[in-house]
Every structure is written in structure tokens, then in C-alpha cells.
Amino acid sequence: MMKYCLSLLLLLGLLVSCTNEKKSAPQLDQATAQKYMAEISSDYYEGRRPFTRGEKRTVEYLKKEIQAMGLEPVAGSYTQDVPLVEIVGHQGETMTLKTQNGEMILEKNEDFVVHTEGNQAEINMEDAEMVFCGYGIVDKSRNWNDFEGQDLKGKVAVVMINDPGFGGEDSTFFKGDEMTYSGRWTYKYEEANRQGAVGLLIIHETASAGYPWYVIKSSWTGTLLGIKKKDTDADCPIKGWISRDQAIALFENSGLDFTETIKSARKPGFKALPLNATCSVSLKSDFKEDVSQNVLGMIKGSKYPEEYIIYTAHWDHLGISTAVEGDSIYNGALDNASGVAAVMSIAKAFSEEGNRPERSIIFLFVTAEEQGLFGSLYYAENPLVPLDKTVCNLNMDGVNPIGAMKDFTIIGLGNSTMDEIAEEEAKKQGRYILPDPDPSKGYFFRSDHFCFVKVGVPALYGEGGYEHEEKGVEYAKEYKELYLEKHYHQPSDEFDPATWNFEGMMQDGQLYLNIGHRLANSREWPEWKEGSAFSR
Ligand SMILES: [Zn+2]
């Protein structure tokens, strides 16, 4: 009798919990995640470089898998063409600066680099006037305009990297040492286009840039990739960098003290200064157009199908390149087969759930992240569903292979109410929230979520990584340092089923799934916070 009662109670309990948890999130399956991980990071995909056989194979595989899950196409297709252009630049050997105190001859790659994002095969810039425009920033919310009263047409703007807050005492002036978007070179390029300058030269400084000159040299010479532009006549055709030493010499030859001038550029009310100098440089460029692909699929919402949650992970990596210890395939296991595997597993779990979510969920695997976030940038500029109906973006880029963490570290904490949503869900996993430990590096601007942020869609980008559940803070730190030193963007970023601990991927993946599930079954719209540089 007792036994029956108990069984009945259990049965009742089960029924109750079934009905109550009708909306509980589906669970990620580790075997599924492992299968995706092993596949996508294998040598067969040849490092997944855009435009290669590796791309074809990756796109085919992802497409086949999401179709098998029963995901629907978006705007009639499982892929989005991303027209890109490969640009090989041939800089003139030297750049000539004519100053009040005579001519300066700068050597290419050692003293300057220039390239074009436009479509002119040959550019000969001759004796263009140079103007020092502080940090090259126009920011209405901060009442800041480095171009005030200047007409840059036909002129070269010379600007500092980073923003006026960097290296100062005041963490509320801009954001102190934390880089704001206007401190990034990408912003400065965009502003130079808006100002109609004929050239932009960014003054490099190791501390402010976050990397030494050799990174400039290797990043901006050789083959560059860009989004194919429709009409680039209006854009600033010559963009580049000059070394700090040459900038100091140029300022001196213009009768300006470099240190004092930079100091004044950091104060409100700074006015751009003509350098009484001109710049001549030439640049030839070869262009090759090609089309890469974003891959995507959708689970249509049952109640609000016109509102969308978008998961992203970049499928691309560096391909086959310089061999290191006999290995030339850059598998990019962590970067970013792991994120793709996690998002694929999330898609699979949602697709197997009995109940459709109320809102639609899109799983978007973007291309060409490594060369400049081009797949996500292209999507943001050519969205397949309306941006104002896009509730949020949930982006995964690199999931730790060493196990579960006590923290969930949010890159770009403080921008939107995605923080609070993530915090509530992380707490249910027994985890705490942390901000980016190194915000001066600008990581917030360096993965695909940022392209959504720029067009006003709140986004989440984070991962556990500070405190290992069993082995603590030091262990996690040592792993991170080892990865950055030995494996980041190296052929050795490989999947090893024997040593990889999948608990981290399961934990972060489940958290991402729970957040998406919650937002897909609510009327909640994450909002931008006051003081954030972004808005809908
Ligand atoms: Zn990468």
C-alpha cells in the first residue's frame, strides 16, 4: 500500500514537473558536441580558410548537418553570399614629407605602411597638406570633435592611436585605460572616410596600440581582405600608420613639441593643428574578387516568429600556412571549431525539443572573422531578418578545453541588460560574473558580436575562464598564458580527445542555451544601458 502511494506520488510529481517544466530548457548532449568538435577541427577541413577547398568542405558539412536537424532556411537559403575582395598592395619604397625644416624620407615597412580599402589600382598622392587631428574622434555624447572647423578634403589627417582617456588618472574621462571604440583603428578609418580626407596616418605607440610595430608591419602588408565596396570614391583612399619616431621628427620639423602637443590633444577644446608639411606617397594595388559564405538555419517561433534570437560562431580560421614542427594545417580547434561545435550542439538540442520556442532562433556561422569580422559585418549591413526585430546576438568564440569554471566572464560588461540576464542564468549554474580582466586590449571590438552591437543589437560574448571549478585560479591562468604563447593562431591549436575536458564547453554551451531559451520564450527585450556608446 505504502509502496503504491509512493509510486502514485512519484508519478504525480513527475506529471506536475512535466507540465511545470514544459518551458524548461533542453539539455546539451556531450557526445554530440564531441562529434562536431572532432569533425570540424580535423585535417580534412584544411584549417577552414575562406576561398579554399577547406571552405567548401566546411560550408557543405554545416549545411548538411543543420538541414538534417530540420532547421529552416533563412530568406530561402542556408547560405548567405559574402562578396569579398583580396587586395595585394605594392607600396612605394618611400614616403616624402616636405616640412618647414626640409625633406624627410620615410622607408616603407620600417617607418610607415599604407594600403587602400578602395578600388583604385594606382594612387599617387602628391604634396597633400598634413593636419594633426588629435585622436581623430568625433563623439557627440562626450562633446568631442577633433575635426572641428577643419575641411580635410585633399588633406592627410595625422592622428594618435587609442583615445584621450588612455594612460590618464581619470577612469571616467572617456573610459580611462579601457579602450573605447573610438580608440580602435577601425573607428579612425571610418571617421577618415566621413571627413573626406585623402589620407589618414595613425601614429603608432606600443602601449596605446597594445602591440609593437612588427604587428603593424605584418598585418598591413601582403594580402588584405575586405568587403567588396559598391562605390568607394567617397572613401579616404590612403590609410596607414607611421612610427612614433618619425612622428616625433615630423612634429619637431613643424615647430611642435611632440609630448606637449599630445598632452594638449588629450584636453577638451583641442583644435586640430596644421603641420605646415606635405605628404607624397604612391600605392599600386591588385584586386581579386571572390565570394565566401555565411551558413545559417532557423527554428521558427510558434508565437512570435517575426522576432529573432541570433546565435553566432565564426567557422573560418587561417587555413594551410607556414609549417611549424612539420605541421602546416592551422586547425583552429579552440579558435573556433569549439564555438561552432557548441552552437551546433545548441541548435541540435533546440531542434529536438518537443515545443517550439515562441520566438524564432537563428544559428548563424559566419566567415572571415580572422581577417576582420567580415562575415558578421556583411550580415549586419545586409541582414536577412530585420535588425529592429532582432532581440539579441549570442556569440561564441573559443570555448576552454580544461573544464568547468566558477566564473562567467563577460567581455564588454556594462553595455546592456544582457549582463543581468546572463548573471541570473549563470547564478543558477552556481557561477559568478566577472568583467573582462584586460579591457585595454579592446577584446569587446574583436569578435563577431561587435558587428551586431554597432548596428544597435544587444549582444553577449563571454566564457568561463578565470576560476577552474576544481583546480582554481592559477590553473586557469597558466592554461590561458600557455595557449596565448604556444597555440594561439598556430598549427598546434588542435583537438586532442585524450586531454580535452569537455565540461567547460558543456557548461558555457548550456548557459548560452538557457539564455537563448529564456529570451525565446519571453517578451523581454534586452536594452542598452545609459552611458553605453551604443543604442538601437
Ligand atoms: Zn582567431
Image (cartoon, rainbow, N blue to C red):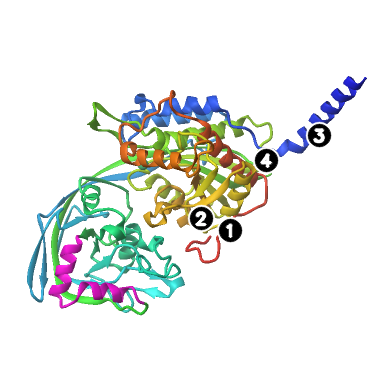
Viewed as shown, does residue 277 lie left or right of 162? left
Label 1 environment density (alpha carbons within 10 Å; few <14, some 14–19, many ≥20): some
| Residue 270 location (% of width, % of height) | 32, 78
Please tell me the numbered disc located at residue 54: none
Asked whether mark 3 lies closer than 8 Å to ligand 1, one says no
| Residue 239 location (% of width, % of height) | 24, 59
Which of label 2 and label 4 is nearer to you? 2
Measured Cα–Cα span from mark 2 to mark 4? 32 Å
Query: Which region shows up in magenta?
Result: 243-267
- Front position in the image: 49 or 324: 324
Which of label 1 and label 4 is nearer to you? 1
Please tell me the numbered disc located at residue 302: 4
| Residue marked by disc 3 | 16
Q: Residue at x 50, y 48 (%)?
A: 409
Residue type at mark 4 is Ser
Give the SS element for disc 2. Answer: loop
Dominant SS in magenta: helix
| Residue marked by disc 1 | 527
Which of label 3 and label 4 is nearer to you? 3
Q: Sequence-wise, which precedes: disc 2 or disc 4?
A: 4
| Residue 339 location (% of width, % of height) | 46, 37
Residue type at mark 3 is Val
Measured Cα–Cα span from mark 2 to mark 1? 13 Å
